[in-house]
Image: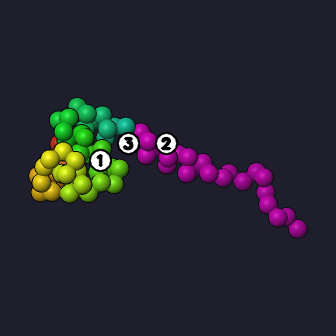
């Protein structure tokens, strides 16, 4: 009775996916840096860390709606 096979190819697809995700992340980050204003990049970073539009607005003195507009504008710049 064999309980396991040490020759199994384990995790290579997961590793390749992680590398692809990391490359994509850095490409998006570079596009954001090159195409967006400092304020838009800051908003993107705060959103990526889980902050809401309202929380970001309070932090930088803008309304929830203005933060949403800036965020949407930044995404449009990045995604083309």
Number of other residues with Cα within 10 Å of mark 1, as a class: few under 14, some 14 to 19, many 20 or more = some
Number of other residues with Cα within 10 Å of mark 2, as a class: few under 14, some 14 to 19, many 20 or more = few
At x 22% / y 47%, what residue is drawn? 59
The image's mark for residue 19 is 2
Asked whether, in this view, residue 22 is left or right of residue 77, the answer is right
Whichever of callouts 2 and 1 sits on the residue coming sooner in the sequence is 2
The image's mark for residue 46 is 1
Viewer-nearest residue: 7 or 19: 19
Number of other residues with Cα within 10 Å of mark 3, as a class: few under 14, some 14 to 19, many 20 or more = few
**Residue range highlighted in magenta:** 1-23
Asked whether, in this view, residue 11 is left or right of residue 66, the answer is right
Give x and y (percent) for residue 76. 17, 47
The image's mark for residue 27 is none
Element type where label 3 sits in the image: helix
Whichever of callouts 3 and 2 sits on the residue coming sooner in the sequence is 2
Viewer-nearest residue: 49 or 5: 49
Q: Quadrant of the C terminus?
A: top left
Q: CA distance from mark 2 to mark 1?
A: 24 Å
Q: Is residue 60 magenta?
A: no
Q: Is residue 79 visible?
A: no
- Asked if 42 appears above or below 7 in the picture, the reply is above
Whichever of callouts 3 and 1 sits on the residue coming sooner in the sequence is 3
Q: Quadrant of residue 50?
A: bottom left
Give x and y (percent) for residue 40. 19, 41
Viewer-nearest residue: 71 or 29: 71
Give x and y (percent) for residue 6. 78, 52
Q: Are marks 3 and 1 in contact (CB under 8 Å)?
A: no
Q: Are marks 3 and 2 in contact (CB under 8 Å)?
A: no
Judged from this view, the residue extending furthest toward the bottom is 1
At x 79% / y 57%, what residue is drawn? 5
Element type where label 2 sits in the image: helix
The image's mark for residue 24 is 3
């Amino acid at each position: 009775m064999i309980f396991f096979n040490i020759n199994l190819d384990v995790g290579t697809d997961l590793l390749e996916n992680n590398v692809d995700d990391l490359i994509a992340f850095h490409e998006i980050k570079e596009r954001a840096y090159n195409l967006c204003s400092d304020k838009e990049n800051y908003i993107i970073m705060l959103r990526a860390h889980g902050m809401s539009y309202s929380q970001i607005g309070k932090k930088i003195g803008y309304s929830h709606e203005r933060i949403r507009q800036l965020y949407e504008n930044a995404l449009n710049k990045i995604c083309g």
